Amino acid sequence: MYGNLSGGGDVSADDPPLSSDQRRSLRRDLASVAARTRELLPGDFVVGSELRTSATGLEATIAVQPPVGSVVSAGYAPTEDDDVSIDDEEREDLAMGLAASAALQVKQAYPDEGSPAAQ
């Protein structure tokens, strides 16, 4: 579902397009994940989301650019035509996973020097 891999079921170009209500709902859910991720991270991290249709179908992405290190992103593809929303538990899981991965990128960018200040 996340960790630089797209999740959900296979979305093919033959699938019917989403209605405007479904797109609005999915955009709202993506914005919610991005906002929750921002809450979990300091202000130096840039968080964004995108919903687009490609040749392979619908692609929803949430990404975090840490102040140092690589971009961390999560892809999401709805599994059912009727319900494309991301439930509360999945949104929290995505946000926490992205925040943890982005924080790890920063930690790995700095060499381990001496002993920790606190234990």
Image (cartoon, helix red, strand yellow):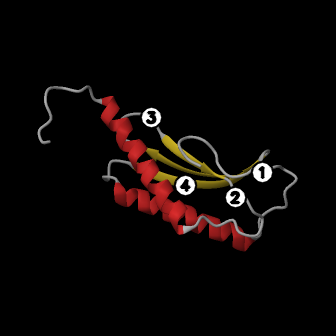
Lateral position of residue 109 relative to residue 80, left or right: left
Q: Amino acid at mark 2?
A: Pro
* Discs 4, 3 touching: Cβ within 8 Å: no
Numbered mark located on residue 49 in the image? 4
Image location of residue 36, percent across then percent down: 42, 62
Which residue lies at the image location 50% right of the left edge and 65% below the top edge?
32
Numbered mark located on residue 11 in the image? 1
Q: Amino acid at mark 4?
A: Ser
Q: Which of the two marks, 2 or 4, is nearer to us in this view?
A: 2
* Discs 2, 1 touching: Cβ within 8 Å: yes
First along the sequence among labels 4 and 1: 1
Mark 2–mark 1 distance (CA, rounded to whole Å) = 8 Å
Which residue was labeled with disc 2?
78
Q: Secondary structure at mark 1?
A: loop
Mark 3–mark 2 distance (CA, rounded to whole Å) = 26 Å
Is the residue marked by circle 1 packed among few (<14), some (14-19), or many (20+) residues within 10 Å?
A: some
Q: Amino acid at mark 1?
A: Val
Viewer-closest of 100 and 57: 100
Q: Secondary structure at mark 4?
A: strand
Q: Which of the two marks, 3 or 1, is nearer to us in this view?
A: 1
* Discs 3, 1 touching: Cβ within 8 Å: no
